[in-house]
Amino acid sequence: MARITKRALAATAGIVMLSTTLAACGGDEGDNGDGPGGTAGKGGTLYVKAEDAIEHLDPHRTYIGLHINMLARTVTRGLLTQSTTDDPAPIPDIATDTGTMAAGGKEWSFTIRDDVKWEDGEAVTCEDFRYGYSRNFATDVITGGPSFYPLSFTDIPGAAEGAPEYSGPYTEKGQDLYDKAVTCDGNTITYRFNKSWPDFNLAVAALHFAAPYRADQDKGDKSNLEIFSNGPYKLEGEWDKESGGTLVQNENYGADDTGTRKALPDKIVFQLGDKAETTYEEIIADAGPAKTTISFNRLPASMFSQIGNEIPEDRYLNVASPFIDYLWFNTEKLDPALRQALAVSTDREAWINASGGERSYKIADSIINPNVPGYAPNSVWKDVPPSGDADQAKTILEDAGIDTPVKVSLQYPQSEGADKQAAALQDSWNSSGLFEVELKPEGDVYYTNIQKPDHDYEIGWAGWGADWNSPSTVLPPLFDSRANIQGGSLGQDYGKYRGDEFNKKLDEASIAAGAGDDAARDKAYQEGGHDPRQRRGLLPARERAVQLRLGLGC
Amino acid sequence: MSSTLSDLETHAIEEHPEGDSLATKVAGRSPTQLALARFRKDKLSMAAFTVVALVFIAGIMAPFLVMSGFLDPTSFHNTSRTGQLIDPSTGLATGKWGGISGDHWLGVEPGTGRDVLSRMWYGITFSLAIAISGALFTVTVGTAVGIVAGASGGFVDAAIGRCIDLVLSFPVTLMLLALSSPGVVFLDETLHVPSGPNKSFVNGLYVVLVLGVFGWPYVARLVRGQVLSLREREFVEAAKLIGASKFRLYFKEILPNLWAPVLVIFTITMPTYVSAEAALNFLGVGIKPPTPTLGNLLTASDDYATSAFLFFLFPAFLIMVIVVSFNLLGDGIRDALDPKGNR
């Protein structure tokens, strides 16, 4: 799910889509519902609370997995969707099957069903899909979404270099190029790519960049917080960016034919702005609307001690996520030996315990999350003790002839939780006696600053999760210097890592994937990833867990 | 004995009622001595003064105690490497009473295992530094503006008065929050103020500036009122008649007669700023951890009000003690200097 911003947290396959399957209990008639897996009652109101505003409702601008899975899927149906179980296989949604790949992954076609309707009763057509996909190219209007993928893959001149000659449906510049690349033949839509995209079906099931959009409903940026639904719910009234909105049943939605959208509650009310602590206290008190309330935010670490007491164990879910938190080191500024010594002496256990402990994180040994195929523990990290090894770090620095203590600085996006975590890292490096660490907290500008090619930051924090169930959404978007470092941006390659050998391995993996050889793909990724890590300048530190606490029984 | 007319004036007035017959016995009792005597008799004020003195001494000592290793506000105790004082499944201290032990007299912080006593003690230093700098700024600017307004009168007075109204009508808290991020960036990157360890200096400076900028009008109004009555006094008239410059009039004749109200204002502003620092920190403005202040300790502890009550109680209690004793001290000083004032 790309970058994790602040508290936004998400997961792809394997997460139960609560907003559609959660029992609707409470309300007037509900009396028999409970959590996922229990028997569900129809009716009632589901309340969803979140601390922060939701930036985008426009399907082509939504990238945060939580928002896709817990909000967008209730109002947006695409070609394919995901199961509500652990099964990563895509399920046909508006497409009749999971799509047909041709030309070695350079061409994909789907047949559109004719019985799916928009909320005004009109049928969803092939042209709606074609129009929706074209919006990704209007990069000045449609921002925030995963347009990176369609922009670089679609067979439009210039796309491979990061500057496609088509600029979206608003200017129609290069429209003829787009009309050749994406075509509708009756009910069949065909996408043509400039390179192999064998897991395109996984991509459209996980993300909404290929969602249909009706041209007559498109008001550009003004559509950002509007919902024009083809799913089981539709927006009642207006959506307020700061406080939320109410979804009601869409009468033009037929039966649940995918098994993923039971649509049991009559209403889903989104209430934004309350602190997570407040929401969870209400949920624990379990009175009134709180009986059917869920939170977008994780259970605050300060409330962990209530699990098993005020919070019954069976009402607490802790699900693994596709995310990895990592530290990046500026490879242009810090000596390889110094980076290695820093990595080896990091007390990852202290870092984890400062941010909630074992319920929040696990020690990671690869930049690819174990939930993603292609994961293999990386020997470079497997043998480093969780609490760090100061002696080993000392030897590394002595061998490299670096005088200690070394002054380094750690940059991070400031928040109450992040302060503690940064202090844990600082203490673990300082207490080895090898480093003098200065903390440099920043506001939200952090995310912009670390992408600037001339930044002089030394160490920084970042998090990344696979966009769909494939390692090709982890290593290339993070460390392929060719795709990342161009124009005025570092992309996601914050540490300015440029590894020719590594890039070659990525190409090998891409070719293997195009040939349908997943084993060869994963092997190439692993060999790339097992490159001597001191050159990579990266410490995969911890896996994130996603915790969900549902309304207590009702 | 005196260099100014004003000194002569005050002594003449004060010595007069003592009477001739007593003059031999109690000669030389200056107003200061009288005030001190009155202050010493007030037991509550003396107790408050003792607490305030202890707080000051603690604040001054803390950096040296940290350097010597007696206080350790930054070391974590949450892993096998550092000593496991935290339960990784709940985040709370493993020991009873929030981990109170011989090594950690007030327990340890949940999650991190940092020593609470050390953080509070060191926090006093930073909180006092902010409160004192803020109060000095406020009182200095406020007094200077108040004197100019009160003594010059007319257009200048009216203009300053409207200025004060303008500043007082600003929605201060809102401005503070809205401007904090760009404000700190401006100080840091445009003015190149030294940022200090963990940016604590630049963050602290922002709080001081803001407290000062929005605090001076209150002082200015009070001082102006005092000056209005002072400027009609004979020694000011006399100075004017012999052609004293405006500067001399303001700062040599009037200012020395204002030290009593200014001192009272200062001692009453201090505790306000100690709690303002805590409140602002709660709203995200000010020195950030790991550098401890009483404010960010309280902020860090508020989530634990139910699960680790002592961790929440200690910083809150310390802030209360400091604020109450400073207030009592301020009241005591006012009563001692002006026994006829409203009690």
Image (cartoon, coloured by chain):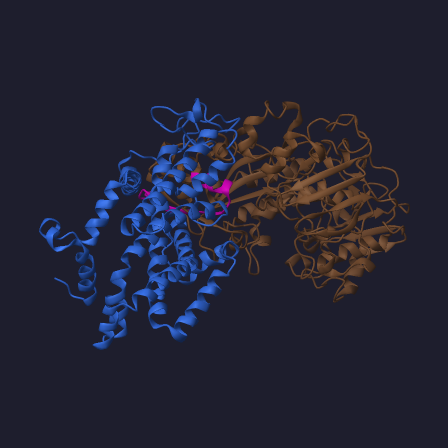
Chain colours: A brown, B blue
Q: Residue at x 34, y 66 (%)?
A: B228
Q: Nearer the viewer, residue B256 or A379?
A: B256
State the image coordinates of residue A172 (x, y, percent, origin top left).
Answer: 76, 66
What is the span of residues highlighted in magenta in the rendered image?
A400-423
> Per the image, is A404 magenta?
yes
Q: Position of residue B233 (x, y in %)?
A: 27, 67
Residue B175 versus residue A478 in the image, above or below: below
Q: Write the residue at 64% across / 30% down.
A: A285
- Residue A408 highlighted magenta (yes or no): yes
Q: Is residue A222 left or right of residue B318?
A: right
Residue drawn at x 55%, y 45% as measured from the top left: A502
Quadrant of residue A403 within the rendered picture: top left
B325 or A383, nearer to the observer: B325
Q: Is residue B277 left or right of residue A204?
A: left
**Numbered label tally:** 0
> Could you say which is closer to the camera, residue B325 or residue A382?
B325
| Residue A160 coordinates in the image, percent (x, y) | 66, 57
Please give the name of the residue rendered at 25% of the width and 61% of the height, measured from the top-left corner. B256
Position of B239 compared to B116: left or right? left
Whether residue A396 is visible, yes or no, is no
- Judge whether residue A451 can be spotted in this image: yes
Q: Quadrant of residue B62?
A: top left
Q: Position of residue B288 (x, y in %)?
A: 43, 45
Nearer to me, A534 or A294: A294
